[in-house]
Amino acid sequence: MFGFIKRNLQLFFTSGSNLFFSVLGALISFVLYIVFLKMNMASSLTFSGKSAVLDPWVISGTLTVTAVTTTLNALSQMIHDRETGTLADFLMTKLAYWQLQTAYLVSAFIIGWLMQLVMAILMYAYFAMVDGLSIPWELAPQLIGIAGFSSLVWTAFSLLCLSFVKRVDTLGKLGTIVGTAAGFFAGVYIPIDSVPSFAQTLMKLTPAPYDAAIYRQLLMKTALTDKFNGAVQGQKMAFETAFGVRLKWESVLSLNDVYGVMIAFLIGFVIVALLLMRRSRKQVMVRI
């Protein structure tokens, strides 16, 4: 099984097109922020040093988009192998079907994890050069942990999505839809408080804003404490809920609540995907 995982990783990282298109959605949100969105959002803020707050804000959302798109792109190899008959050929070896499926999932998880860390380094490096943003090396262990948790959730989501896909030519359409939607649901294109109530509710019915909120509470903590030091009570909380740093249903969710929601999504995705896996297995077994 480890050899199969290595094979999937090599196929992904040796393909320039795979690498590019897997982060295209994240790159689009990042470029849009630099060219258009940053100026508009900065104009609505009254404190100085706005980049210290807005830059980690967009980094957090972009990392969420990266987790979504890279795990989906990595797991798409399973559809390629299924349609071309490669998966059926591997079943002729000693590997069982569940081992092959596990290998695909582990590969996608590793890819999503690594690509988030790569994007984080690239974005922080850019903002360090352009805005003088300090790279928070002391947060690296926590960032690595969040990236792993994020990749786990979105790998399960990708497995669920791809359970409905039978043909390779569908992957491009699905990837475009998911990549575009991820930026909206993660609150990268526009702060969550700037959309209508119905849209806010729709966003919060997906894991994306929760994932982004976990990143934001880590990466923006120091900047927010500095900017709102001595501010009127509640002003900081108002900013955090408006910009998706903290999410609110009946009340503002704690960080533990956000993690709980993400875990609930993870469990739900896994259960439904496992139920649908039987159909996928039949499609492969008929080729043997």
Image (cartoon, rainbow, N blue to C red):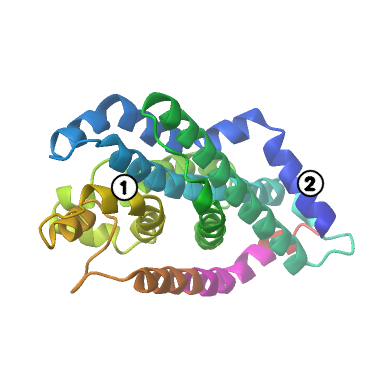
Residue tagged 2: 7
Specify which label sits upstream in the sequence, 1 or 2.
2
**Residue 241 in sight here:** yes
Q: Residue furthest right?
A: 94
Name the chief secondary structure element in magenta: helix
Q: Amino acid at mark 1?
A: Ala
Measured as percent of width and height from the top left, residue 136 is found at 47, 45
Q: Amino acid at mark 2?
A: Arg
Q: Residue at x 50, y 41 (%)?
A: 120
Mark 2 surroundings within 10 Å by alpha-carbon count, few (fewer than 14), some (14 through 19), many (20 or more)? some
Quadrant of the drawing holding the N terminus: bottom right
Determine whether 217 is above or below 127 in the image. Answer: below
Residue 198 located within the stretch drawn in magenta: no
Q: Residue at x 43, y 38 (%)?
A: 134
Question: 247 or 143: nearer the eye?
Answer: 143
Determine whether 103 is above or below 59 in the image. Answer: below
Measured as percent of width and height from the top left, residue 66 is found at 48, 44
Question: 233 or 202: nearer the eye?
Answer: 233
Measured as percent of width and height from the top left, residue 59 is found at 40, 42
Mark 1 surroundings within 10 Å by alpha-carbon count, few (fewer than 14), some (14 through 19), many (20 or more)? some
Residue tagged 1: 223
Total labels drawn:
2
Question: 57 or 16: nearer the eye?
Answer: 57
**Residue 24 in sight here:** no
Measured as percent of width and height from the top left, residue 259 is found at 42, 70
First to last magenta residue range: 268-281
Q: Residue at x 81, y 67 (%)?
A: 96
Residue 278 located within the stretch drawn in magenta: yes
Res 203 label: none
Quadrant of the drawing holding the C terminus: bottom right
Q: CA distance from mark 1 to mark 2?
A: 42 Å
Side of 249 where 282 appears, left or right: right
